[in-house]
Image (cartoon, grey):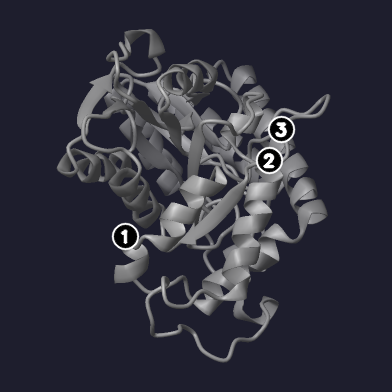
Amino acid sequence: MTGHAALDPRLDFTSSLFLGLHHGSGSLPPWASLTTGVPTVLHEAADAHRVADTVAAAQGAQAGVVGRSALHALMDVMGMIPQRGDVVAIDSAAYSLAEWAALRAAANGAVVRRYPHHRPEAIVPTTGRRLFVLTDGWCPGCNRPAPLPELQQLARETGGALIVDDSLAFGVLGNKRRGEVFGDGSGTPRWCGLDHAGIVWVASLAKAFGAPLAVTTGDSTTIRRLAGEGGNRVHSSPPSAADLAAASTALHDPSGNRVRRTRLQGQVLRLRSRLHDLGLTANGLPFPVVSIRLPGSDAQRWWSRLQSAGIRALLQQSRCRRGAMLTVLVRADHSPADLERLTAALLAGQRGVA
């Protein structure tokens, strides 16, 4: 492990800093003031524009804007874009932020509906009404992407948009070259082979990039409206100078991030292979969230055994499927020895459960 993890003798598989970026104070450029003291709409740092432009360019989006968090960003998107009479369709297993943000659309007179998880065929557009589909890009419950091509097409046909919260996958998944599983980290839509037409994309950088702020991308008209008409940019401070420095540092190291993603991909595939050797099946597709579906009592016992072995893991209750899962979050800064220690503890747990 790195010096960061050496502070705690326990082996940690609960952090979603997937690329292993930690941003110690000595690794960032200095700043004269932590915050501006004024709302974002009155003053925005040049670094914020650079961060948003970098993310948008990587996706082939026309423009981007920085937000304080994914919640702030989604609240603004749902409060400004759908209008009275529009239909907002939410994936029934979407993260809670989607439900909270949809309240803004409902307050403006939009009709909010829920559709079964990853079943776009269940969405029936209403004649004469724009459709806005709100979904997570990647589901940690079934460890699969949303059916974004079908959802994009449905929304575009009505003049609406597909709104994607991609906080979990941004920095990990993206446009893939031959032999790659994860891709360039630009997001789930690109991983699915989509262009950015008809998509409003929101993601926090707090996971893979280790910077607690968010970026929204889309067409220039939509982004200009989000940037200039108020919403949370009137009522909240901008991301701090430290947040922006961390985001800018992370995003402007593409070669380093590529190396980290390649390492992360290898770690995930290696762990899934070792689980298979133990007779265990990792849930869904390869992703840094590696889960084993177990009966609830078994999951609790396995988790307790890992805790006793000095290994931090998660008990996960899926939003989209029944049953509990024992989950570990793999990072690029985990070592092969860390994975071996984990699999040895799982083997011991397997014998204990049997």
Residue annotated with mark 3: 175
Q: Mark 1 is on which residue type?
A: Gly
Q: Mark 3 is on which residue type?
A: Asn
Marks 3/1: CA–CA distance: 32 Å
Residue annotated with mark 1: 231
* In the rendered image, the vertical position of residue 199 relative to residue 240, given as above or below: above
Residue 170: assigned label: none
Q: Secondary structure at mark 1?
A: loop
Q: Secondary structure at mark 2?
A: loop
- Which quadrant holds the C terminus? top left
* Residue at x 65%, y 34% (from the top left corner): 268
Residue annotated with mark 2: 60
Q: Mark 2 is on which residue type?
A: Gly
Pick the front one: 126 or 92:
126
- Residue 6 in percent (x, y) is at 60, 66
**Residue closest to the far top:** 121
Lower sequence index among marks 2 and 1: 2
